[in-house]
Image (cartoon, grey):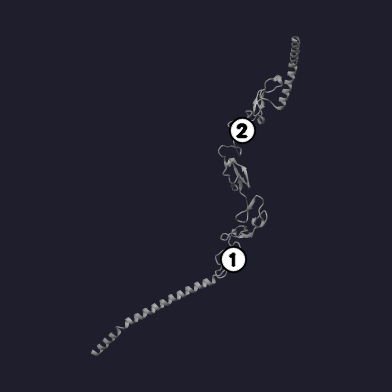
Amino acid sequence: MRGDRATVSRERCNDGPLHPTRRNVAEEEIGMRFSLFLLSFSLLAVFAGLSFAITTGSCADGTPYGKCSTKFPGQYCTGNINAPTLGTLLTTCPCSQFPGYVQQGDGDAASCIAAKCSILVDNSTGCGCPAGKRVAADGIFCEFIPCNDTGVSVPEGTCSPKKGKKCVNGALVDKASECGCSAGKTKVGETCAIVCSDGTEDGKCSATKPKKCTNGYLLDDAPTCGCPEGLSPVGKQCSAPVLGGLGGVDTLGGSPSENESGTAGASNALSCCCLPIALIGLAGGFAFFRKRK
């Protein structure tokens, strides 16, 4: 009995330390397997990355995958990552990125073509521009040269800062209805004009003769605007004629022809009425002188 108990006791003593050792070994095996899994996963990820970097090639013209071609307008490098190809994608790679190219067509049928010298497609860089126009910033179209309003540049389609005029097709035109008028001027149709107090436009004759509107003032200008009926021009003013018997000579002088005719009439009148009196006077004086002798 004692021997059996001793044997069992030894077995228990021997079995006791065996169980912890087996658990440690199992845990170590699990840890090693997990480490190997992580290592394998990491190596796989690195390999995949290198494979992607190597196999994500460029298109035939050297354009990287997912980029616009720098050699072919409107072309985009796409398709299979390992073997990409160029395809038309104007929404991402517009034709305007290449000077001298324009889009032709719409949707899937759209493409980039070189602009030609025709009435349909412009190429101002290659074909130049007509008189009054210059090459636009895009190098494709022509634009009007800005107008010049006495030293002030006026872009096409805009009003001059000096008001009253607008640049239309490279030329300044009167457009008071859109551009307004500067101070001191009044809109007359599409023009801006100086108007006198009676409504007469600058440089024109007033209905009240001999007035003329000059720089906003009504001034006499009988030679240009004439005189009212019954009056005659005298310098810039008008005057009524007097001494009608002397050939209608104006007291302030008339025209050269009138003055000449008036002088001739006066001479005739003097020769007719004064010559006999002078002769009588001379005869009387001669008789008186002889009598004294």
Whether residue 165 can be seen here: yes
Q: Quadrant of residue 193?
A: top right
How many numbered callouts? 2
Circle 2 — which element?
A: strand
**In-front residue for pair 214/128:** 214
Mark number, residue 237 = none
Figure quadrant of residue 211? top right
Q: Which mark lies nearer to you, 2 or 1?
A: 2
Q: Amino acid at mark 2?
A: Cys
Name the image quarter holding the C terminus.
Answer: top right
Residue 253 or residue 169, whichever sits in front? 253
- Residue underneath mark 1: 86
Residue farthest to the bottom, as pictured: 3
Helix, strand or loop for disc 1:
strand
At 35% from the left and 80% from the top, the residue drawn is 24
Is residue 174 shown above or below 43?
Answer: above
Question: Which residue appears farthest toward the front when viewing the image?
Answer: 293
Residue at far top of view = 291
Give the quadrant of the N terminus: bottom left
Position of residue 88 measured from the top left corner of the image (x, y, whole percent): 59, 62
Q: Residue at x 51, y 73 (%)?
A: 50
Instruction: Check if mark 2's residue and mark 1's residue have beta carbons within 8 Å.
Output: no
Counting from the top left corner in percent of width and height, residue 278 is at 74, 15
User: Residue 187, relative to residue 103: is it above or below?
Assistant: above
Residue 187, relative to residue 145: is it above or below?
A: above
**x%, y% of residue 3?**
25, 90
Q: Which residue is mark 2?
A: 213
Mark closest to the chain's N terminus, 2 or 1: 1
